Image (tube, rainbow, N blue to C red):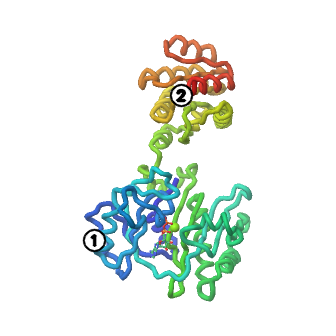
Amino acid sequence: MNIHEYQAKQLLREYGAPVSEGVPVTRAEEAKTAASQLDGPLWVVKAQIHAGGRGKGSFKEAQAGEKGGVRLARSVEEAAEEAQKMLGRTLVTHQTGPAGKQVNRIYIEDGSDIERELYLALLVDRGSSRVSFVCSTEGGMDIEQVAANTPDKILSFSVDPASGISGFHGRRVAFALGLQGQQVKQCVALVNTLYRMFIERDMEMLEINPLIVTTDGTLKCLDAKMGFDSNALYRQPAILALRDETEEDPKELAASKFDLNYIALDGEIGCMVNGAGLAMATMDIIKLYGAEPANFLDVGGGATKDKVTEAFKIITSDSNVKGILVNIFGGIMRCDVIAEGVVAAVREVGLQVPLVVRLEGTNVEKGKEIINGSGLDVIAADDLSDAAEKIVKAVKG
Ligand code: ADP
Ligand code: MG
C-alpha cells in the first residue's frame, strides 16, 4: 500500500526527520487560508497523487507552456491560484501511464533554497533478504536515467539485521553523498531514523528524492514516497488509516475486500484460477497460444460460492476482457463450489464473452454436472493446454 507525499512527510516529522512545513488542501476555497499559514517568501504547490515524476508531468488539456504538478509561487495569492488550477484535473507522469491520475488534493509547502539535490532510498532487497540503502549524488527528477546511464553514480548496500543500523551506515551514506561537517552528523541521524521507521512501520520502500542540502547547509527531505507491506497492515492500524482508496484500481480494491489475490493486467483473457502457481502457469499458457491475460486471479484454497461469484463479477466488469478461462484444480477447493459460483455469477451479471471451463480434482463430476445442467453456453476443456487453445481460438477466431 502506498501513501501520499503529505502523509509520508507527517510520518517523517513524527520521527524527527527534517521536512518543510506544509498544509494539504482538498477544496479550492481552502487554498488561500492554507497558503497564508506558511511564511513565504517562496511557496511550493504540489499535486498529491500516488505516482512520482509530478514535476516533469503535464496536465491533460494543459495550456501551451503550462507547468506540471509541482509549481513555485511567490505570494499567498499566487500559491492559492496555482492550487486551484490543479485541483480536479488529470496529471500524466511517466509513472501514471497515459490515463493519468486525477488530482484530488494539493500540498502547499514552504519553499526551500536548494544547493544540491541528492537521492536516498531504503527498500527490501529480495536478493539479499535484507533492507538495502540506495543513494546517489544525482538526486532530483531523473534518477531512472542515472540508474540506466551511469550506474556507478549509485551506491547500494544492505544492513545486517543481526547487528542492525549503526553510525557506520550513516557515515557511509554521507561520504557517498559528499557531505561535510555538520551535514555528516545530520546524515547519520537521518539514516538511523529512516531505518527505524522502515522496520517499525513494515515498509517495503521509502524514497527521499530529492534529499537536499539547503543554501544554509542543512539536510532536508523535499519529497517522500512510502510503500508498506500489505500483509503487515493488520498490525499497522495508523498506517492503514492513511489508505486512499481513490488511488487504487477499483477492480483490485473490490478484490481486496473479498480477500481475492487479484492483479489487473492489460490483456484480453480473464482468468479465474485457484493457487498462485496454477494461476501463473495459466497466464503462461495463454501467452504460449498467442493471447495475453487480462488479470492474475487466485481465488485461494477455501473459496466460498460468494467469493467465486464476486471474482467472476470483477473479471466481467473489465471491458478489456474478451473471453474468460476458468481453470480449477480441486484439492481443498471443490470443483462443485466453483461451478456453483460461476453459474450464480453468470445468472446475475450475464455472459457477453466466451467462457471456457476446465475442472479437475475433488468433486469434478459434480462440478461438470452443475455446469452442464445450467444451460449456460460454456465450452468445456479437458486439460490445461486444451483450455488455453479453446479460449484463445474463441477470442481470436
Ligand atoms: P516529483 O518527484 O514527483 O517530480 P518532487 O517533490 O521531487 O516531485 O519535486 C520536484 C522538484 O521540485 C524537486 O526536485 C525540487 O527541485 C522541487 N521542489 C519540490 N519541493 C520543493 C520545495 N519545498 N522547495 C523548493 N523546491 C521544491
Ligand atoms: Mg521527487
Using a 10 Å C-alpha cutoff, classify the residue at mark 1 as few (fewer than 14 neighbours), some (14 to 19) or many (20 or more).
Answer: some
Circles 2 and 1: CB distance less than 8 Å? no
Q: Identify the element where label 1 is drawn.
A: helix
Task: Answer few, some or many: residues within 10 Å of disc 2's Cα (few below 14, many 20 plus, some between 14 and 19).
Answer: many
Whole-percent x and y of residue 125?
A: 68, 58
What residue is pinned by disc 1?
33
- Specify whether 266 is left or right of 34: right
Separation of disc 2 and disc 1 at Cα? 52 Å
Q: Which mark is residue 323?
A: 2
The residue that appears at 55% across and 56% down in the rendered structure is: 228
Which structural element holds mark 2?
Answer: strand
- Asked if 62 appears above or below 394 in the picture, the reply is below
Q: Position of residue 130 (x, y in %)?
A: 70, 60
The one nearer the camera, 395 or 339, is 395
Residue type marked 2: Gly
User: Residue 397 at x, y = what percent?
Assistant: 57, 24
User: In the image as oriented, which residue stretches furthest toward the left?
Assistant: 29
Q: Tag 1 or tag 2, which sits nearer the N-term? A: 1
Question: x and y percent of residue 325 in the render?
Answer: 58, 27
The quarter holding residue 81 reads bottom left
Q: Amino acid at mark 1?
A: Thr
Quadrant for residue 126, please give it.
bottom right
User: Which numbered mark, 2 or 1, is in the foreground of this view?
Assistant: 2
User: Is 109 situated above or below 205?
Assistant: below
Q: Residue at x 63, y 86 (%)?
A: 180
Determine whether 139 is above or below 64 in the image. Answer: below
